[in-house]
Amino acid sequence: MAAEFTSFPAGWRGGLMHNDLWRYACEFYARRGVEAACLAAQAQGSNVCLALCALWLEQRQVTWEAVRAEVLSEIALPWERTVVQPLRELREQWRPAAAGDIRLGQLRESVKRLELEAEQTLLARLQSAAQAWPATCTTQPGWLDWAVPDATARAALRAASSQA
């Protein structure tokens, strides 16, 4: 999810759409250490929305299957590349100049909101694809292993997911 996510007012986190994965992502992202772990995973090439979806699927005890993972990838990767990433890059490019330019800072906040709405849309699409997959009482944590190849970032996300 977008860096600086936690700086938004709590009321916005409900966003335009209400779904289980979005609520899960918001609650999980607010936990101590999660933002840093997500940014570390993102820096290593992981898609944070896929990682959050993976944790949600593991929590729901949905068995990892390659065909299911492919379905999620086919939804997430093009959206990330064509919608989320360009917004993120613009927001990051404007960071230094926005520090000294109030109007640009306001525009940057608008871009940040668009980036989060794009991620929220992606999470809704991922949930829609995965919602019917049944829980199987599995204890295999295959989803996060698939979504976050970096062991350090994965361990930090697992630690955060075990927090109450």
Image (spheres, grey):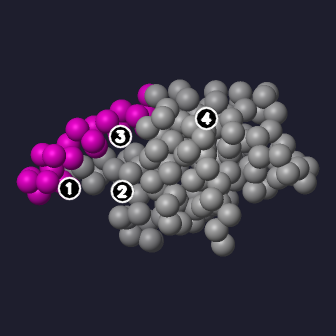
| Label number found at residue 106 | 1
Asked if residue 108 lies left or right of residue 96, the reply is right
Q: Closest to the observer: 119 or 161?
A: 161
Q: Is residue 100 magenta?
A: yes
Q: Closest to the observer: 159 or 147?
A: 159
SS category of the residue bearing label 3: helix
**Mark found first going from the N terminus, 1 or 3:** 3
Distance of label 4 from label 3 (alpha carbons): 22 Å
**Mark found first going from the N terminus, 4 or 3:** 3
Distance of label 2 from label 1 (alpha carbons): 14 Å
Please, what is the three-letter code of the amino acid marked with disc 3? Arg
Distance of label 1 from label 3 (alpha carbons): 15 Å
Do the residues bearing badges 4 and 1 touch, measured as CB atoms within 8 Å?
Answer: no
SS category of the residue bearing label 1: helix
Name the main secondary structure of what is drawn in magenta.
helix
Q: Which residue is mark 2?
A: 4
Please, what is the three-letter code of the amino acid marked with disc 2? Glu
Q: Residue at x 64, y 30 (%)?
A: 73
Tell me residue 18's x, y (percent).
Answer: 60, 60
**Mark found first going from the N terminus, 2 or 3:** 2
Q: Residue at x 69, y 53 (%)?
A: 56
Tell me residue 3's x, y (percent).
Answer: 38, 51
Q: Residue at x 58, y 57 (%)?
A: 25
Q: Which residue is mark 3?
A: 88
SS category of the residue bearing label 4: loop
Tell me residue 10's x, y (percent).
Answer: 44, 71
Tell me residue 81's x, y (percent).
Answer: 46, 28
Q: In the rendered structure, which segment of residues is drawn in magenta? A: 82-106
Please, what is the three-letter code of the amino acid marked with disc 4? Pro
Q: Nearer the viewer, mark 4 or mark 1?
A: 4
Q: Which residue is mark 4?
A: 149
